Image (cartoon, helix red, strand yellow):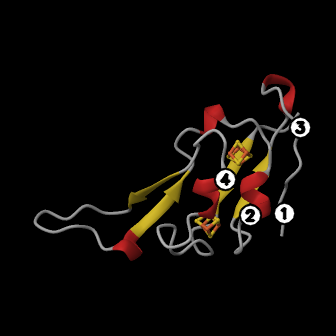
Amino acid sequence: MTKDQLTIDQNLCKSPLECGLCLQVCPQAVFKAAPARVYKFRETPEEEYVLKPYYWMACVGCGKCVEVCPKKAITLKVNLSSRGGVVVGQNLS
Ligand code: SF4
Ligand code: SF4
């Protein structure tokens, strides 16, 4: 049995604050854009934010994030027996 996995290719998802489509469609609010780096006396520039699947444990495997991502940056592999849904999206490219 493969282990559940949701990965984001940071080389493909370069501006999550600008795009944000996966953040909008996810019914479980799994994603969060957070600063990759924090500076002492200034705000982190937008281009230094990265997308993270912070609340991955809440994912129901609907696949909407994979479908909506214009950069094909999200890979989802879910064995749903414990998540109560149906996998419709998997990006292996
Ligand atoms: S598969 Fe569905 S629930 Fe899981 S992170 Fe993607 S959009 Fe959210
Ligand atoms: S939809 Fe894709 S490109 Fe857009 S923020 Fe999400 S992972 Fe990044």
Label 3 vs 4, first from the N-terminus? 4
Q: Which residue is mark 3?
A: 86
Identity of the residue drawn at 76% across and 38% down: 4
CB under 8 Å between callouts 1 and 3? no
Pinpoint residue 85: horizontal percent, then vertical percent.
Answer: 84, 32
> Quick one: 72 or 37, which is closer to the camera?
72
Quadrant of the snapshot with the C terminus: bottom right
Element type at mark 4: helix
CB under 8 Å between callouts 3 and 4? no
Instruction: State how far apart marks 4 and 2 are (Cα).
Output: 8 Å
Identity of the residue drawn at 63% across and 75% down: 12
Pinpoint residue 36: horizontal percent, then vertical percent.
Answer: 38, 62
Identity of the residue drawn at 75% across and 35% down: 60
Q: Amino acid at mark 4?
A: Val
* Rendered image: mark on residue 25: 4
Identity of the residue drawn at 30% across and 74% down: 45
Pinpoint residue 27: horizontal percent, then vertical percent.
Answer: 66, 42
Q: Amino acid at mark 3?
A: Val
Q: Which residue is mark 2?
A: 68
Instruction: State how far apart marks 2 and 3 are (Cα).
Output: 17 Å
Instruction: State how far apart marks 4 and 1 are (Cα).
Output: 20 Å
Ligand 2 is within 8 Å of the C-beta of the residue at disc 2: yes
Ligand 1 is within 8 Å of the C-beta of the residue at disc 4: yes
Q: Amino acid at mark 2?
A: Val
Q: Which residue is mark 1?
A: 92
Image height of 34 relative to 83, above or below: below
Front of the two marks 2 and 1: 2
Q: Is residue 17 left or right of residue 58?
A: left
Pinpoint residue 75: horizontal percent, then vertical percent.
Answer: 75, 57
For ligand 2, the image quadrant comes to bottom right
